[in-house]
Image (cartoon, rainbow, N blue to C red):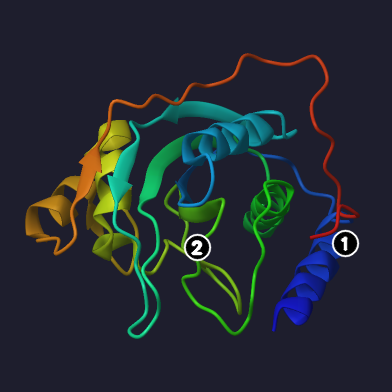
Amino acid sequence: AAPFFCTWINRHLQIISHWKRPLKSTTIHIGLGSNLGDRLAHLQRAILILSTTPGVEILNVSSVYESAALVLPGRAPQPDYLNAVIACRSSLQPMEMLHVCLVTEKRLGRTRSPQVKWEARTIDLDLLLWSNIVFSNEILTIPHPRLADRPFVLLPLSEIDIDLKIPAPFDCTVRYLLSTYSPTSPALRTSLVLTIPPSLNEPIRWSSTTRV
């Protein structure tokens, strides 16, 4: 359930905050999506928030793609999604970055229901890849387990680095996944543009006490 999920995240972040560990920058890739309200503005605002997070530097932003929403059988149709992928350099740990993504989603008006899967949303942030790291626990799996089935992830990811090696269980490049995948619902590149914000003097402050 959602309350347990948020409590688990916050407790985990409190433990992490006490670790005495050297910070080593790692390249990560995050998928962004929105199908409610001003979709492009939500994507750009999410990039702005992430760019002002201590320990996170935006390196690259893909083109914006549009695709049909994935809807469970029997559910009402949803508006189409705008999607993009960003590459970041980060000194955070995976669970810390997940916390940042969840708080960012909440700031942009996303609400989560434990009873509804694939609901329409103002913003969705997915941790796709964490360099060559394989990570898994009760609530987070990296690489993203459905990465290979989503053209709205593979196509923007290929713009950033088509020969990027994806670790287990895929053990192949983005180029290979694209060459072997026949999407039933295409993602179309749009003329819309997302930008990397300039450095700001006053970054948004995050801590283990920031609640989701």
Whether residue 150 is visible? yes
Residue 156, given in percent of the width and then of the height, sits at: 30, 40
What residue lies at 61% left-to-right and 79% top-to-bottom? 138
| Mark before the other along the chain sequence, 1 or 2 | 1
Q: Nearer the viewer, mark 1 or mark 2?
A: 2
Mark 1 is surrounded, within 10 Å at the Cα level, by few (under 14), some (14 to 19) or many (20 or more) other residues, namely: some
Residue found at x 84% / y 36%: 205
Query: Relative to residue 157, is residue 182 depicted above or below?
Result: below
Q: Name the kind of residue labelled 1 in the image.
A: Gln
Q: Amino acid at mark 2?
A: Ala
Describe the element under mark 2 as helix, strand or loop.
loop
Q: Quadrant of residue 99?
A: bottom right
Q: Quadrant of the C terminus?
A: bottom right
Q: Measured from the top left, where is residue 64 in percent x and y? A: 35, 35
Residue at image location 29% in from the left, 57% down from the top: 68
The image shows residue 180 at horizontal and vertical percentages of: 9, 59
Instruction: For the N terminus, give its image quadrant.
Output: bottom right
- Position in image of residue 6 (x %, y %): 77, 71
Q: Is residue 132 left or right of residue 206?
A: left
Query: Is 146 displayed left or right of 44 in the figure?
Result: left
**Which residue occupies the foreground of this view, 96 or 66?**
66
| Viewer-nearest residue: 97 or 156 | 156
Which residue is disc 1 drawn over? 14
Mark 1 element type: helix
Q: Which residue is mark 2?
A: 120
